[in-house]
Image: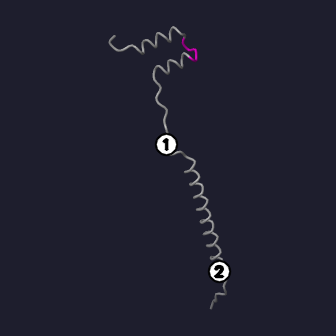
Amino acid sequence: MHSWDGDMGVWGYTMMSISMLVVWGAIIAGIILLARSLRTPNQQNQQFPSPRTAEDLLAERFAREEIDATEYQDRLNVLRRRPGT
């Protein structure tokens, strides 16, 4: 007959080690998830830049000297002209 003399045995120590790893893993994962949620801005607070207009793009091309002043003025007048006039 086997008697228990207070020793956990191999399986006791194995389960204790595995459960300790699981608990510490959960604690570390919780800290990481908390840090990420505090660092990442909320979707509601995120502002997207307004879309650029054709005049903005034309001004950028003029600023990069891709077009000269005459061409810039001509194209700007075309953009600002109302349809049918």
Classify mark 2: helix, strand or loop: loop
Tell me the number on the disc at residue 45.
Answer: 1
- Label 1 and label 2: CA atoms lie apart by 55 Å
Disc 1 residue crowd, few under 14, some 14–19, many 20+, Cα 10 Å: few
Q: Which residue lies furthest to the bottom in this view?
A: 1
- For the C terminus, which image quadrant? top left
**Residue at the image point whose x is 46% and y is 21% from the top:** 54
Magenta residues (range): 63-67
Total residue callouts: 2
Name which residue lies at 60% across and 69% down.
Answer: 19
Decide: is 70 above or below 14: above
The residue carrying mark 2 is 8
Residue 7 shown left or right of residue 60 in the figure: right
Residue furthest front as drawn:
45
Q: Residue at x 41, y 15 (%)?
A: 80
Q: Relative to 7, does residue 27 appear above or below in the rendering?
A: above
Q: In which quadrant of the rendered image does the N terminus lie?
A: bottom right
Q: Are marks 1 and 2 in contact (CB under 8 Å)?
A: no
Q: Which of 5 and 27 is in front in this view?
A: 27
For the residue labelled by badge 1, is the local secondary structure a helix, a strand or a loop? loop
Q: Residue furthest left?
A: 84
Measuring from the top left, give residue 62's x and y in whole percent: 54, 15
Mark 1 residue type: Asn
Main secondary-structure element of the magenta-colored stretch: loop
Q: For residue 14: magenta?
A: no
Mark 1 against mark 2, which lies toward the viewer?
Answer: 1
Give the numbered dot on residue 57: none
Q: Quadrant of residue 17?
A: bottom right
Image location of residue 2, percent across then percent down: 63, 89
Which residue is at the front of the view, 65 or 39?
39
Amino acid type at mark 2: Met
